[in-house]
Amino acid sequence: MKILVLGLPRSRSNFVTSALAEFYGVPNLKEPYCHAIEDSQVSSITNELLKTRDFVCKLQSSNVKLNMYTECQYNMYDNIYITARKNISDQIASLLVAKTNDTWGYYPAEPSSIVFDTDKHMQIVWEIGLDIYKMIILKNQLAEDNIHVKTLHYEISEEWVKTHLDNPKIDLKKSHYDYKKIITNYSELEDVTNRHFEKLKLL
């Protein structure tokens, strides 16, 4: 069995990938494409995956190359999942907290307050917007090729894992942050998010 998780930033993609690997008893190859810069590297990695019998791996949205759709051979996978988030403001806030505190994979008990500054932090909004846009295009391409993709939203993924994957013991905790208390001007962040994403069909 070959399973692919397409992960957007701050969507618990590592948690879902690890849970799938444990449930099916197959190796977790993590992110084989994360250092693939040249097109030839993408093809080489894909060829290795084609020769590998059973695994789960993740492809982060920042590493998705839409011009390499054929080379990725998505039809090799038995199951493909997208991990996304319904609350885009929280997604941006989560990435902002991680970048500000340089905390990846763990969560400080009491992160310091942050002011969302449109002069400094719009890059994060654009980054997430571009990643969502790429995922929408990729999902549509897969649908045209009759390749089914299941979207798991951050807000329900933990419950889905408990229900469908026998509640595996994965040591990847959820932050449970209230970003309205961390981002001191959260309402301004929400306004920016609403304007930026109002015409973008979300996953």
Image: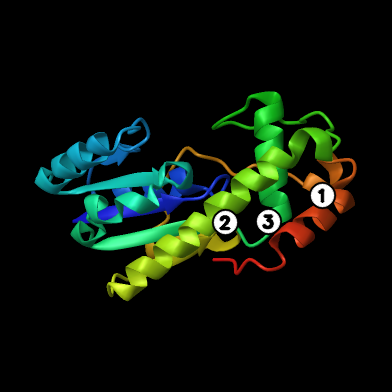
- Judging depth in this view, the residue of 27 and 78 nearest the camera is 78
Which amino acid type is marked by label 3? Answer: Ile
Q: Residue at x 53, y 50 (%)?
A: 131
Of helix, strand and loop, which one carries label 2? helix
Q: What is the spatial separation of the Cα atoms under label 1 and label 2, in whole angstroms?
A: 19 Å
Type of the residue with mark 1: Leu
- In the drawing, what numbered circle is on residue 88? 3
Residue 189 has which mark? 1
Name the side, left or right, on which 100 lies relative to 145.
Answer: right
Residue 54: which disc?
Answer: none
Q: Determine whether, in the image, residue 109 is placed left or right of residue 148.
A: right
Any part of residue 55 in sight? yes
- 10 Å crowding of disc 2: few (<14), some (14-19), many (20+): many
Q: Secondary structure at mark 1?
A: helix
Residue sitting at 71 percent across and 51 percent down? 90
The residue where tag 2 is placed is 154
**Residue 185 figure quarter:** top right
